């Protein structure tokens, strides 16, 4: 199909089903929502590309510093896949390159879930409310249908001696596979003159300035 055939005729807009609709037939509020959605989406795309460029630049700069250090002192600083931190001279800013494993879960995860539930069935009703909430929360998938990795791994940290719990943890461990790693760039700013740092958020969910309910 040519570009000409895809062109929307003057005076029309295409709806979500792909139908052409006369603009004069569209509700004014829907037109305003359309304008806002397009404007915000384009700004979001620009911000996304800026973040992509920043991440590439930060990783390149850190790798360059590692190379300089290796050449000057004949040592390996962090390496290509290691975590490393650099700071401004006054200690106000800290930049971290952090590698994290990408974890997925195999078929054994279903056996683990069944064993955790079996554990709940065997402990007394009064004592298992917190444990049930913990397990239910860990195995509840996200809106996208993904398992909650951090919550599942947290189950392994509890020192529970019940045989079914231990067996469930073994099944959970067997289900884990590492599919490579992801690199993050974390930027922090020192809080006044203390030893504490606060992150400079680079994801929209962590940025302040929104509405408080």
Image (cartoon, rainbow, N blue to C red):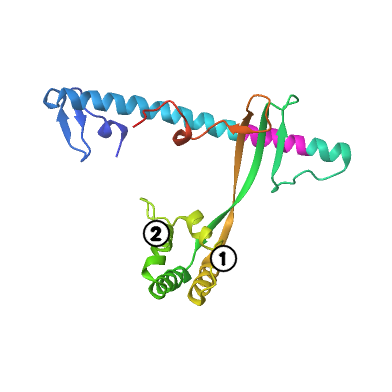
Magenta residues, start to end: 56-66
Answer above or below: position of 39 versus 82: above
Q: Which mark is residue 133?
A: 2
Is 4 above or below relative to 11?
below
Residue 105 spot, x, y in % from top left: 49, 63
Does 20 appear above or below 109? above
Please tell me which residue is depicted at 53% across the width and 68% down the height of the picture: 160
Residue 111 position (above or below residue 71): below
Q: Earlier in the sequence, mark 2 or mark 1?
A: 2
Q: Residue at x 26, y 30 (%)?
A: 7
Q: How many marks?
A: 2
At label 1, counting other C-alpha atoms closer than 10 Å, the crowd grade (few under 14, some 14-19, many 20 or more) is: few
Residue 158: quadrant of the picture: bottom right
The C terminus lies in quadrant? top left
Q: Main secondary structure of the magenta part?
A: helix
Q: Residue furthest right?
A: 73
Q: Tell me what residue is drawn at x 21 percent, y 29 percent.
A: 13
Secondary structure state at the residue bearing disc 1: loop
Q: Quadrant of the N terminus?
A: top left
Q: For the residues labelled 2 and 1, say whether their Cβ atoms are less than 8 Å apart.
A: no
Along the line of sight, the residue nearer the viewer: 183 or 130: 130
Towards the viewer: 32 or 205: 205
Of the numbered discs in the image, which one, if any, rests on residue 159?
Answer: 1
Residue 134 percent location from the top left of the image: 43, 59
Question: Which residue is drawn at the image coordinates 76% and 35% (left, top)?
Answer: 65
Q: Residue furthest left?
A: 25
The answer to whether 22 appears left or right of 71 in the picture is left
Q: Quadrant of residue 186?
A: top right
Residue 59 belongs to the span the image colors magenta: yes
Q: Quadrant of residue 68?
A: top right
């Amino acid at each position: 199909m040519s570009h000409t055939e895809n062109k929307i005729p003057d005076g029309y807009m295409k709806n979500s089903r792909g139908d052409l609709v006369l603009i004069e037939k569209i509700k004014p509020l829907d037109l305003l929502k359309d304008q806002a959605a397009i404007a915000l989406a384009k700004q979001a795309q620009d911000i996304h590309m800026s973040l992509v460029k920043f991440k590439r630049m930060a990783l390149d700069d850190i790798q360059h510093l590692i190379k300089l250090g290796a050449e000057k002192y004949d040592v390996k600083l962090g390496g290509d896949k290691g975590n490393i931190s650099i700071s401004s001279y006054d200690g106000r800013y800290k930049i971290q390159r952090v590698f994290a494993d990408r974890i997925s879960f195999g078929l054994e995860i279903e056996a683990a879930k069944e064993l955790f539930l079996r554990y709940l069935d065997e402990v007394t009703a009064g004592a298992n409310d917190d444990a049930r909430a913990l397990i239910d929360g860990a195995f509840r998938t996200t809106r996208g249908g993904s398992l909650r990795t951090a919550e599942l791994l947290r189950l392994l940290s509890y020192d529970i001696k019940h045989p079914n719990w231990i067996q469930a943890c073994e099944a959970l461990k067997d289900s884990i596979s590492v599919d490579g790693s992801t690199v993050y760039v974390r930027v922090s700013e020192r809080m006044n003159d203390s030893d504490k740092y606060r992150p400079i958020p680079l994801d929209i969910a962590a940025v302040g300035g929104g509405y408080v309910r």
